[in-house]
Image (cartoon, grey):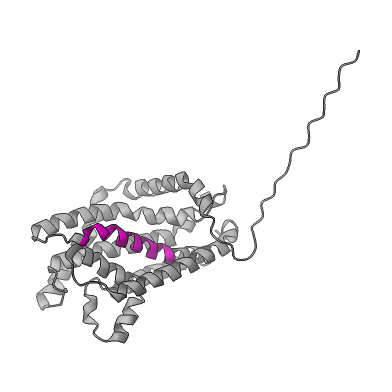
Amino acid sequence: MGAASLPLPSPPRKLKLRPKSGWQPVDFAEIWHYRELLWILAKRDIQVRYKQTLLGILWAIVQPLAQMIIFTLLFARNGFPTGGITPQLFYFSGSICWLLFATSLSNSGNSLVNNQNLITKVYFPRLVIPIAAVITALVDFSISFALLGVLMFWYHSVPTPTLFLVPVFVMLALLASLSIGLWLSALNVQYRDVRYVLTFVVQFWFFVTPVIYPAGIFKKQWERIIVSLNPMSGVVEGFRWCLFGKPAPGFMLLISVATIALLLVGGLFYFRRMEKTFADLV
């Protein structure tokens, strides 16, 4: 009796991945699936940031502390208004809130170009990269915020009951940086001079944000509306309000939040639109 014939193995299936055309919504479930990669990238960026540095994490307090000293010497002694807040606390609080935004924006804007080897080798949702770049700025902010607590104790500034809202404004600062970083990171893949423009934009943006002056100096309604269109105006004012209780951000915060929401939604769709070209252009 002859041996039973064995079935021949079926040929291997081939799966071809093709980018979808048109405007695609963000797949948040897929991003959640790759959440471990997000934390790995964030941890790597933090380690690289402080690797082989002399001062290490102390760099997180050097810049805002230096800005506080310089701004106090230049402006506070000449009677520049600080909205009824101790000048040292006014400048330091504004600086750490701004640096959280500026660092996150710079990291996210350059994130795709800095990870070009990873993008061309393996598939994962590219949105993970700018999000991870934004998260890394929280380390510096946490250290400088601890120093702010010491300064508040030194200058006998009692925290207000709205202190528990600080995480809300920290999140708004991160969302503001991410909303603009998505646009810039995608553009940076196509036009490499965007990184140089980004440096100029951050420097210019600093002076149109109420960091070294209170938003209350703008008395006319149309001036306050224009200032409020800057998403960081309401965030910085709200951050100070949480800490010191004055002045309340009011309608400025509403306009800033609306601006952040519009920029974020537009940035997500634009990023998804350009995502299919990253591996070829980067």
182 left or right of 62 in image? right
Tell me if 198 is positioned left or right of 156 in this view: right
Q: Quadrant of the C terminus?
A: bottom right
- For image coordinates 36% across by 75% down, the residue present is 255
Give the percent coordinates (x, y) of residue 155: 9, 61
Q: Quadrant of residue 190?
A: bottom right
Q: Nearer the viewer, residue 7 or 91?
A: 7
- How many labels were placed on the picture? 0
Apparent side of residue 191 relative to residue 23 in the rendered image (left or right): left
Name which quarter of the figure residue 12 lies in. Answer: top right
Rendering coords of residue 89 (x, y %): 16, 64
**What is the chief secondary structure element of the magenta stretch?**
helix
Q: Quadrant of the N terminus?
A: top right
Q: Is residue 117 visible?
A: no
Where is residue 80? Give x, y as percent: 15, 77
Which sits in the foreground, 23 or 208? 23
Residue depicted at 40% across the width and 49% down the height: 42
Magenta segment includes 168? yes
The residue shown at (78%, 35%) is 10
Q: Work out whether 130 lies above or below 269.
A: above
Q: Position of residue 160 (x, y in %)?
A: 17, 61
| Res. 220 image quadrant | bottom left
Does the magenta portion include 232?
no
| Residue 194 is at least partly visible in this image | yes
Q: Residue furthest front?
A: 161
Name the residue at the right extreme.
Answer: 1
Give, as a single range, the part of the protein colored magenta. Answer: 162-179
Q: Is residue 217 left or right of residue 266?
A: left
Q: Nearer the viewer, residue 158 or 273?
A: 158
